[in-house]
Amino acid sequence: MMSSCLSVCRVGISFVMMNIFYKSAVDSLPELSPQKYFSTLQPGKASLAYFCQADSPGTSVFLEELNEAVKPLQDYGISVAKVNCVKEETSRYCGKEKDLMKAYLFRGNILLREFPTDTLFDANAIVAHVLFALLFNEVKYITTLEDLQNIENALKGKANVVFSYVRAIGTPEHRAVMEAAFVYGNTHQFVLTTEIALLESIGTEDIEYAHLYFFHCKAVLDLTQQCRRTLMERPLTTLNIHRFIKTMEAPLLTEVAEDPQQVSTVHLQLGLPLVFIVSQQATYEADRGTAEWVAWRLLGKAGVLLLLRDSLEVDIPQHANVVFKREEGVPVEFLVLHDIDLIISRVENNMHIEEVREDEDNDMEGPDIDIQDDEVAETIYRDRKRQLPLELTVELTEETFNATVMASDSIVLFYAGWQAVSMAFLQSYIDVAIKLKGTPTMLLTRVNCADWSGVCTKQNVTQFPVVKMYKEGRNPVSYAGMLGTEDLLKFIQLNRISCPVNITSVQEAEEYLSGELYKDLISYSSVSVLGLFSPTMTSGQINMLQLFQPCCLPDTKKPEITVENLPIYLRLQKPLLILFSDGSIIPRYKKTILTLVKEKHLDSLTPCWLNLKNTPVGRGILQVYFDALPPLPLLLVVNLHSGGQVFAFPSDQDVTEQNLLLWLKKLEAGLESHITILPAQEWKPPFPAYDFLSMMEAAASRRSTREGPECVKETDVQESHEEQHEDKPAIRDEPTETLRIKHWNRSNWFKEAEKSFRHDNKEL
């Protein structure tokens, strides 16, 4: 089980574990003809080959990542090559276009595995997949708790188990585990899973990140006894796993009778401290038991030794019972600690200091632009096994792109199959296609820029993912909304109609204001604007009226706060009167607040509410305000723009008009104490591209102050095909949002408008 034909490759490999942690100059990717490549294959040697047409323009991104993987794969004795096919070639690997979208792993001239290039999305994925295929016997992939228990029982008294959970195959953590398995696979049985339910079943509390456990099964002789488990608490990197396994292999407890300053073990070499439990002959048995208990608690974090005071030639302070050695060359510390937890805390605090130092060193190098936000990672790993119905959208290529977007109004998603955000948004895009299935709408298409980089370059696509709308006779319009299903669906649905809508009769105007006209779009809009124009008006006057948009908010009396609309309310520069609720708003609370709104007692505030079921981030907000999550519903005043104070309505009072008004007057008079003060520092994203709140604020601002109409303005048909589909700055770069206003006495307002309209006609 532990043997492999790769065993001979492992001799002397350990030094590789230390040498691959720095970036060296990457060897160039060899380019060979098919005949030359197959002639270089050697029996027993592994080789990864990518077959492609010599003049193929759509492989540049993948080849860059493959080039990055050349050096690390060579460190493991695996050659890498790009094989240039000629068009006349009809072999298995060069004949069909679909075969050119794969990489092939050989041992000698035997094909071991085919990899679709979209699974090899970066250098980490390439190395991880190749090693995973080669280490089939050393790394067991499991999906159930029963599988894990069977392996554990089979290895009791024989070998230890290294069990790891990674969120997906091909991640950096997966690569780190595979590299460790390459070195230690002969010694320990590696077990891998991507099933989060399996991780939960073994009692892990924090299941958000990758985990690695060491199961101490070799020392277990009783088959009914469970193997002791030790969790690696550091991130899953190759260096951390190497250091962790080395400490698992070291003796649990060592007895010494020499100067602690002169003692050195593998722990110090790996950057871990040493803890000496001072013992004497009279209390030896009890001290050894204590030392073993401490050793298990600190396994993987520090080395633990039993220091025999009676045999020492060096004097140790009589009161000291613990000696702490941080690192080589640093004087040891003599401590008096009468509680095991104090010893543990001493080590863990030292680890925290070291981690802070490492973080500071990393911060000096600047943030990593490749790091994606947590929600993107969560989406990708949560849905990693979900089969997307891609057939609901049309895949475009260099040959079909122009003909397709010219023949019909089209929505085009430009994405990269190797990029995390693209793959997360592709799921939202397909969800939109599912919702629109069977309804007349624009054609939904997609272009994988990793395969057709030429198309994306011509369409001025400089980042991923990007959605563009192509309509005949108009410039392409880029979608600039949130990367989610509902917002994209709104963009597509509202662009089905022309904007502005040309209304030619009183009946149509009434239907528009009542919601009967385009009633299927009501759910995608919040405010409507009707402009009345006289035939005597100039085009300039009409344009000025088209710019008019009232500053209206959804349900201005008491709106629900969401992530999307929060910037709109913050821009009002008023304190927020927020009702936090775990579900629908309680009717009597709503009635109380609306009554005060109508009586204008809340003009200086922005009354709103936040549904924690719809917006779970609200729980995190409350935890910032309170030490523990308070009972709901809860009414707060948050003064974000002046002082940052947060006030809570007394929990022992009922929310009535009288009580609420009295409380607000006390706030105004300074007679109420705040529960917390929010810090004044500005929390900025690591890069401008991640500043989503500013993007939403800018979008909302443009809706009320833009220098042109909100909607796409029809343009003359371009004279040439190239000009028509070249992406130029469009009039509108935000989705159309047909806004709908409900007036207190809309029927009377409309009658007055109708009289004015008829009066203008009479004058003509």
Image: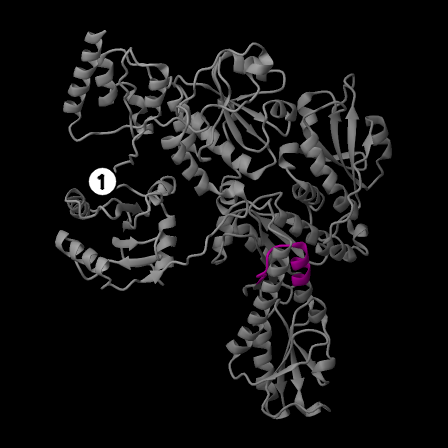
> Which quadrant holds residue 680?
bottom left
Q: Residue furthest left?
A: 658
* Element class at badge 1: loop
At a point 53% along the width and 73% down the height, the residue shown is: 345
Task: State left or right for residue 722 relative to residue 392.
Answer: right
Q: Magenta part of the protein: which range? A: 231-245
Residue 1 seen in render: no
Magenta residue check for 244: yes
Residue 84 in percent (x, y) is at 78, 26
Task: State left or right for residue 407 relative to residue 679.
Answer: right
Q: Which residue is mark 1?
A: 557
- From the viewer's side, name the closer residue of 208 and 518: 518
Total tally of numbered discs in the picture: 1
> Which quadrant holds residue 266?
bottom right
**In the displayed structure, would residue 250 be above or below residue 171?**
below
> Which quadrant holds residue 239?
bottom right
Residue 184 seen in render: yes
At a point 86% along the width and 29% down the height, the residue shown is: 36
**In the displayed structure, would residue 741 be above or below residue 569?**
above
**In the displayed structure, would residue 650 be above or below residue 319?**
above
Task: State left or right for residue 670 relative to residue 85.
Answer: left
Task: Check disc 1: other Cα within 10 Å, few if <14, some if 14-19, many if 20+.
Answer: some
- From the viewer's side, name the closer residue of 587 and 181: 587
Residue 362 in percent (x, y) is at 63, 56
Residue 754 in percent (x, y) is at 18, 16
